Image (tube, rainbow, N blue to C red):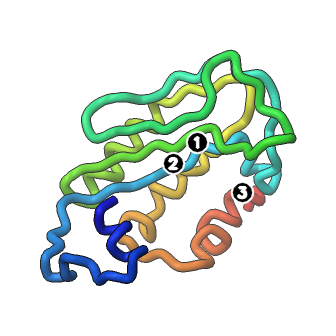
Amino acid sequence: VREQLRVAGGLPLSVGQSDVRPRGHAIECRIYAEDPARNFLPSTGHLTAFDIPAGPGVRVDAGVAAGSTVSVHYDPLLGKIIAWDRDRPHAIARMRRALGELRVDGVRTTRDFLRQVLDTPEFQAGQLHTRLLEDVLGPRLAGG
């Protein structure tokens, strides 16, 4: 926050890029009440279960709980899962475990779609591009 205030006041950052030391790898998955098989249309309903993952290196930021209602009047974002580990392969494995522990009943979600993304060789290698979803997962979603 100090640095943000400095920059907002017109001052330069007090650290340089050479002072920053990367440590580990983090991945964030956003869990939406959407149906990937129906072109990500919102999925509405009453959440009869919302069990979030836990454990070291896993954080969940959620705005709903079991008993919540998901309606068409609000953003369908249910929550974000953040997984951190020492490197990309371990962070992916940790996220896969976390997504496997996530239980949402009452609406369709993007959970299984995100697991498919994590499983692609392109994602695992960090070879991402703007057409990854259409080129790699699009045919699977379309039933091809």
Rendered residue at 39%/55% (across/down): 27
Say which residue label 3 marks: 141
C-alpha span from label 1 to label 3: 14 Å
Give the SS element for disc 1: helix
Tell me the mark number nearer the camera, choosing from 1 and 3: 1
Give the SS element for disc 3: helix
Asked if disc 2 and disc 1 are in contact, CB closer than 8 Å, the reply is yes
Rendered residue at 46%/43% (across/down): 81
Say which residue label 2 marks: 115
From the viewer's perspective, tell me whether residue 60 is left or right of residue 139.
Answer: left
Say which residue label 1 marks: 111
From the viewer's perspective, tell me whether residue 144 is left or right of residue 133.
Answer: right
Tell me the mark number nearer the camera, choosing from 2 and 3: 2
Q: Residues within 10 Å of mark 3 (few under 14, many from 20)?
A: some
Percent x, y of residue 8: 42, 74
Q: Reply above or below: 99 against 28.
A: above
Q: Residues within 10 Å of mark 2 (few under 14, many from 20)?
A: some
> What's under tag 1, amino acid-wise?
Arg
